[in-house]
Amino acid sequence: MPAAAMAMPPNPRIAATNAKTKKTRAQVREFLARQNPGGRLITGDEVAAAVWSLIEHDENGTILELDGAGVTRVEGPIPVGSP
């Protein structure tokens, strides 16, 4: 894991999981990454790119799934003027 990622302030969810399971931050992150089909946690840049693509293409009502393996369009977009 990059040093910058380790220097980030603790995520409250990970901290709560640390306390509850007695696992280290690295162990919790590894466990969560294994739950994703891509076997890794997604980055903020990946989220930003997905959001930007929705804004750029004016895709109202579109649902995207980011799972570490790629971006999957789950639903949408909703055509303009639909009830």
Image: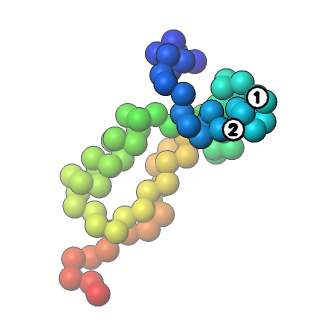
Residue 10: x and y in percent read 54, 28
Q: Is residue 55 above or below residue 5?
A: below
Q: Is residue 15 left or right of residue 59?
A: right
Disc 1 designates what residue?
23
**Neighbours of disc 1 within 10 Å: few (<14), some (14-19), many (20+):** some
User: How many numbered marks does the figure carry?
Assistant: 2
How far separated are the C-alphas under marks 1 and 2? 8 Å
Q: Earlier in the sequence, mark 1 or mark 2?
A: 2
Disc 2 designates what residue?
17
- Image quadrant containing the N terminus: top right
Task: Say which mark, if any, is on residue 72.
Answer: none
Residue 45: x and y in percent read 37, 34
Identified at 48% across, 63% down, the residue is 74
Identify the secondary structure beneath mark 1. loop
Which amino acid, by three-letter code, is at mark 2?
A: Thr
Can residue 40 be seen in this snapshot? yes
Report the front residue among 15 and 31.
15
Report the front residue among 35 and 23.
23
Residue 8: x and y in percent read 48, 22
Q: Is residue 2 left or right of residue 21?
A: left
Identified at 29% across, 87% down, the residue is 83
Which amino acid, by three-letter code, is at mark 1?
A: Lys
Q: Are marks 1 and 2 in contact (CB under 8 Å)?
A: yes
Q: Is residue 20 left or right of residue 77?
A: right
Identified at 54% across, 33% down, the residue is 11
